[in-house]
Structures are given as C-alpha cells and as structure tokens.
Image (tube, grey):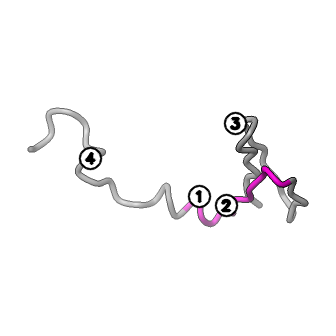
Amino acid sequence: MGVVVNERLDEGRVVFESPTLLLQEHFISIDLIGRRLRRPRGWRDRPRGSGL
C-alpha cells in the first residue's frame, strides 16, 4: 500500500497493490510515509513562543 504522486499534475492517489507507473509518476510506500510522520520535531518545527 502506498501513494502514487503525479509531479506534473500536482496530485496523487492511494494504491493497495504495486502500481504500473507513468513516466511522470512516483510511488511512495506507506512505510516511508509512516516513518516520516513519526520523526521527532526539530527546533524549526516548534510552535512560536516555546523556547529560544
């Protein structure tokens, strides 16, 4: 499962099986998306007014 992103149309779709991609499309695995979302927040991502 993952997402197919079309860079020319600036849109994407969720897929449940390995897709056949067009030249302008890229597949992003749900595993990569999940790891990205669980990454700890850095100092640049902190809300305003919290620390230095």
- Say whether marks 1 and 2 touch (CB < 8 Å): yes
Q: Quadrant of residue 46?
A: top left
Residue at the spot 10% in from the left edge and 43% down from the top edge = 51
CA–CA distance in space, label 3 to label 2: 19 Å
Kind of element beneath mark 2: helix
Kind of element beneath mark 1: helix
What residue is shown with label 3?
10
What residue is shown with label 1?
33
What residue is shown with label 2?
30
Residue 32 % position (x, y): 59, 64
Kind of element beneath mark 3: loop
Q: Residues within 10 Å of mark 3 (few under 14, many from 20)?
A: few
- Say whether marks 1 and 3 touch (CB < 8 Å): no
Which segment is the magenta one?
23-34
- Say whether marks 1 and 4 touch (CB < 8 Å): no
Q: Nearer the viewer, residue 25 or 52?
A: 25
Residue 47 % position (x, y): 25, 37
Q: Nearer the viewer, residue 29 or 23?
A: 23
What residue is shown with label 4?
44
What's under tag 1, amino acid-wise? Ile
